[in-house]
Amino acid sequence: MPTPPSRLKARTPRGFADRTAADIRATEQMVARIRRVYERYGFEPGETPLVEYTESLGKFLPDQDRPNEGVFSFRDDDAQEARSAGGATGKQGEWLSLRYDLTAPLARYVAENYERLPKPYRSYRFGWVFRNEKPGPGRFRQFMQFDADTVGSQSPAADAEMCMMMADVMEELGIPRGQYIIKVNSRKVLDGVMEAAGISDEKQKLAVLRAIDKLDRLGIEGVRQLLGPGRWDGGKEGEGDFTKGAGLSGRQIDNVIQFMSPTAGADDSGSIAKWASWIVEGSQVGADGMRELDQIGTLVRAAGYNEDRIKIDPSVVRGLEYYTGTVFEAELLAKIPNEKGQPVVFGSVGGGGRYDGLVGRFMSENVPAVGFSIGVSRLQAALSALGQLDIKAGSGPVVILVMDKARIGDYQKMVADLRQADVPAEMYLGESGMKAQMKYADKRDAPLVIIQGGDEKAKGVVQIKDMRAGKEMAAGLADHDAYREARVGQEEVAEGDLVEAVNRLLGRGERRP
Amino acid sequence: MPTPPSRLKARTPRGFADRTAADIRATEQMVARIRRVYERYGFEPGETPLVEYTESLGKFLPDQDRPNEGVFSFRDDDAQEARSAGGATGKQGEWLSLRYDLTAPLARYVAENYERLPKPYRSYRFGWVFRNEKPGPGRFRQFMQFDADTVGSQSPAADAEMCMMMADVMEELGIPRGQYIIKVNSRKVLDGVMEAAGISDEKQKLAVLRAIDKLDRLGIEGVRQLLGPGRWDGGKEGEGDFTKGAGLSGRQIDNVIQFMSPTAGADDSGSIAKWASWIVEGSQVGADGMRELDQIGTLVRAAGYNEDRIKIDPSVVRGLEYYTGTVFEAELLAKIPNEKGQPVVFGSVGGGGRYDGLVGRFMSENVPAVGFSIGVSRLQAALSALGQLDIKAGSGPVVILVMDKARIGDYQKMVADLRQADVPAEMYLGESGMKAQMKYADKRDAPLVIIQGGDEKAKGVVQIKDMRAGKEMAAGLADHDAYREARVGQEEVAEGDLVEAVNRLLGRGERRP
């Protein structure tokens, strides 16, 4: 039915989604489990507002060329701010933005409260972040992240802990060992590779990072093109848009490709030995990175985390520009059907790394930091597909039907008694008849329905219908009489015994006050 | 120390606040209790995004004259949207806004999913809302609301239920009976009063509502001025700004004032009788409003809620413009110190009402609705002051000190063992010595500290220091030796018994796996 033009169309902006009760309950289950792990590691909750000064957030998103730089921004027209912003901008205040991640606001928070906070400051936070990007299937403009960060420690033990914690999170969420992997790499080693190869231009270095980051999607040949002159999106010359490349020489490209290519069968010390011997030779930063990766490896192995859980992978670079050292990625190896129904390796569900320069944007001191961020919505999609987030059926409220509108005071009293005993319950509040009321109870996932018509009232009894037992029948019932003849999962109790009977049927006798 | 101009200042925009672990834990406690009541009443969770089309939200805020109408708004530059917005606006997309409440988005949601939803649709939601207003003490631009709504029922039983539920919430939060009141009124009765007094201009009617809404702050004389020609903010002519009044005649003002003035000692039926006899005479809408209030009163009394909990108060009007019938307000009567330390009645912590026209903005059908919104941050402030949100001390992680940096692998192993047994634990990750590490553990609210220096290692033991017992001593300790001499709350156990001893000291032996 077309809506008349004068009426508003009810719709959400693209990339912004509503959530149902089942979605919310699944997220809560998941978040509670992640949180349990974070707290077990000694992290405490923290929270920053959703709106920050644009300059506080900085420009670290992977796709800087997009309109508005990927961030939702607007002017502050708070009078005092506008005044202090001074003459040049007239009456307009400073730019505000919706946060695009939880890390940039954390850096601002630590700098603002540095004296007061315990150091190192170990905290976790979860909440919505926003990206002003082109929305698509599974790609939202508002999505949830769940981060943990250690600020004020330069010890590789802090990095090692992040990796182990992420492995523990995966297992706490029911993902069996072997079905996930925490991949570790170091931007310092990458810098060493580039330094050794004579790549020193900052823009060129950034282009190299972005090219490597696309390995999953484009394969090794695509990355090779992006390291060189560039690549046509369609894969062949002239097809689709052209993305300009990093412009490396042939030898430079070979070095980068050789660095990121896995050595068949090599363990982590093998990878490090390979780099040490020929790639990062003569680069101090490269040597530092290798030593840190080696220390992380030693620590996680000592704690019993082997290469089936935490492993060096030189192709991991992470998109955000603020990383300065170690970078991590948590990947699900389980195959899960994609939009086309084909089973594919699910891939990344979170990542992180060291961002030693981020707090220093606000302070004279340099404050090292390392963190990890879980993409909650994406991980939830995977867990649902894996059957790890089941919500029990029959979890709705007990519904008291309204058989006689003149007696809603009586029904209201029944509801009040049940609630008093901590039983979720409600009286039907619509205008419809018996059949629609039963359908309503079914839609609400009610475990029990309470019925008291004139006959029952005269006898001082109520009927209790167990919807879990007789669910398949409910939809087909034509009227009250037909319903009463079909006494599947139905029992009659004295009015005064209602609460006791409901508690018994719900198997929660012990919870009565 | 002044920050050099080239460095960013770490700050939040005014009216946006960070939250500490204690704040977050207190909110969670409170929200869990409120939620328990909502679920007991048969409401299920729902959620909408923080960003909506501006036109979906509508213009219902009390202070429409402010810049940007009290709402944070920005253009959508999603390409597809921009294209469909067409030529006149060029490449720019539609206006988006941060939600200013949870009710307008709910109306959009119900309209968009009407066929699918059970009707009546009973749901609750909590989350952040935003107001582009002048921030001040206790007045934030981002704050949390926790709402419950019944959409699709025109029955006064739905209104009655809201009132009872709010009373139950207050008691679940530990506010004793007599320390709160749920006030009920009806915009229809108010409309009846105005109709009977010959006030028919819509702007004038709105001005009357706003004047009544200010009774708490301005007193009856202030309201009288605002109903008439207007009022000087300073209280006397020429002092402060002038607020234009509703421009009523003397007789009209008397009628309104008489309506909203409480009749000393009158119960609810007394109030209704008073109105019926002389004010809303001849007004159909007024008569409807009185009948609804009467029905609500009958229902809540039948369920055992008396006038010490739910009571008619004709001065309640609520600021939002979308209300069409019943309006409610939950007030704390407890006296709580204000900013100046003077004990004052805390006042409103939430409110709501009927908004029968809001869903109809999107649909051809008219969909009646009633809801209630709790101001979470404000209520939390009150509960903290009343001592209802205590967080237990000693709730931080067990901290393992680093006595010898060469042995962090060993310490890491201890931490891993504790975590394996589900004990929140961490190894100190900073660079400082013994004294600073003890201070750190104290700041983290650690219940226990684990120490293993060279001597202990040689003997195969660890020291466990109970911080809860010896907290007062920790700050004064000069060095390791002095510390070890003061053996208050300290015990030595074999390395292999660490987990067992920690569990015992934390009184959680039964939680071991």
Image (cartoon, coloured by chain):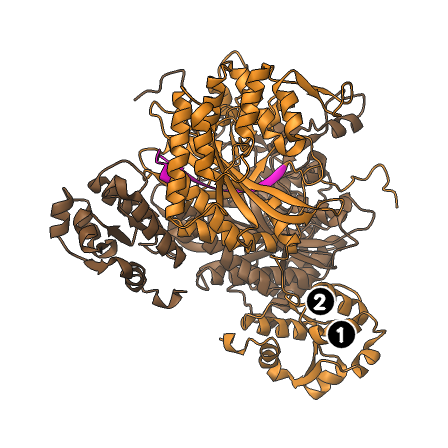
Chain colours: A orange, B brown
In the rendered structure, which segment of residues is drawn in magenta? A142-157
- Give the image location of residue A280, x and y in percent: 44, 23
Q: Nearer the viewer, residue B202 or A412?
A: A412
Residue drawn at (21%, 42%) of the image: B434
Task: Name above or below for residue B417 compared with residue B444.
Answer: below
Which label was assigned to residue A164?
A: none
Q: Indicate left or right for B87 with A53 as reference.
A: right
Q: CA distance from mark 1 to mark 2?
A: 11 Å
- Residue B503 as seen in the image, left or right of residue B9: left
Q: Is residue B70 above or below residue A228?
A: below
Q: Which residue is mark 2?
A: A428
**Residue that extends furthest to the top in the rendered view of this protein:** A88
Quadrant location of residue A224?
A: top right
Q: Nearer the viewer, residue A298 or B313?
A: A298
Residue A387 at x, y = what percent?
Answer: 64, 57
Circle number at residue A404: 1
The chain holding disc 1 is A
Q: Chain of mark 2?
A: A
Amino acid at pointer 1 = Asp
Q: Is residue B398 left or right of residue A56?
A: left
Q: Earlier in the sequence, mark 1 or mark 2?
A: 1
Query: Closer to us: mark 1 or mark 2?
Result: 2
Viewer-closest of A394 and B156: A394
Residue A140 in the image, given as x and y percentages of width and height: 65, 38
Q: Residues within 10 Å of mark 1 (few under 14, many from 20)?
A: few
Q: Are marks 1 and 2 in contact (CB under 8 Å)?
A: no
Q: Amino acid at mark 2?
A: Tyr
